[in-house]
Image: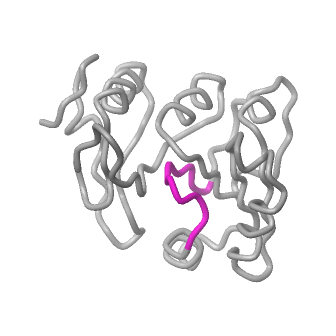
Amino acid sequence: MAGASYLLFRIDDRLLHGQVALGWGMRLHPAHYLIVDDETAGDPLACSLYAAAAPEGTDVACISVAEATAAGFHGPDPESTVLLVRGVEIAARLLRAGIPGPVNLGGLHLRPGAVERAPALFLTPEDETTLGRLVQEGFLLSAQDLPTTRPRPVGNWIHGEGGGAR
């Protein structure tokens, strides 16, 4: 599904919440939020709760990773859509399937084995390895919690196959 980049392609373990809907939404004015998450796609109640959190006048779709990476997938216009995924590995699958970046690393919160690399950005060694490989493969990724903060390109602080902060 190569083509136009998404208005925002964000990794955030909370998916659609105030920081995304208000902080990014007020700046970007999306018409659509596309949540690519197997768990949410299989739970209509969860998807309806995310839709209720979206700004008025926007719509929310929840699809599985398989749907998003299927040949011939046609979702909402990327240029008016915020694409949200829960983790680094899902973003990597989408990028490698041809869904265009760049990717914004937003909120990944404390979990076992994760270390804080930026405010509200906790990465596991596996996350860092995946991010390092994505950078080596030429994908653009940056950490930025809000549009008012300066983006930190991942290539500046993740390196090589083993990751690790510089």
For the rendered model, the colour scheme is one colour
Q: Residue furthest bottom?
A: 56
Q: Residue at x 31, y 35 (%)?
A: 124
Q: Nearer the viewer, residue 158 or 63?
A: 63
Q: Looking at the image, is 100 positioned above or below residue 151?
A: above
Q: Is residue 87 left or right of residue 147?
A: right
Report x, y in % for residue 115.
Answer: 23, 44
Q: Residue furthest front?
A: 112
Q: Can you tell which quarter of the image residue 50 is in? A: bottom right
Check if residue 13 falls in the magenta segment.
yes
Check if residue 107 falls in the magenta segment.
no
For the C terminus, the image quarter is top left
Magenta extent:
7-17
Q: Residue at x 28, y 29 (%)?
A: 125
For the N terminus, the image quarter is top right
Q: Residue at x 80, y 52 (%)?
A: 43
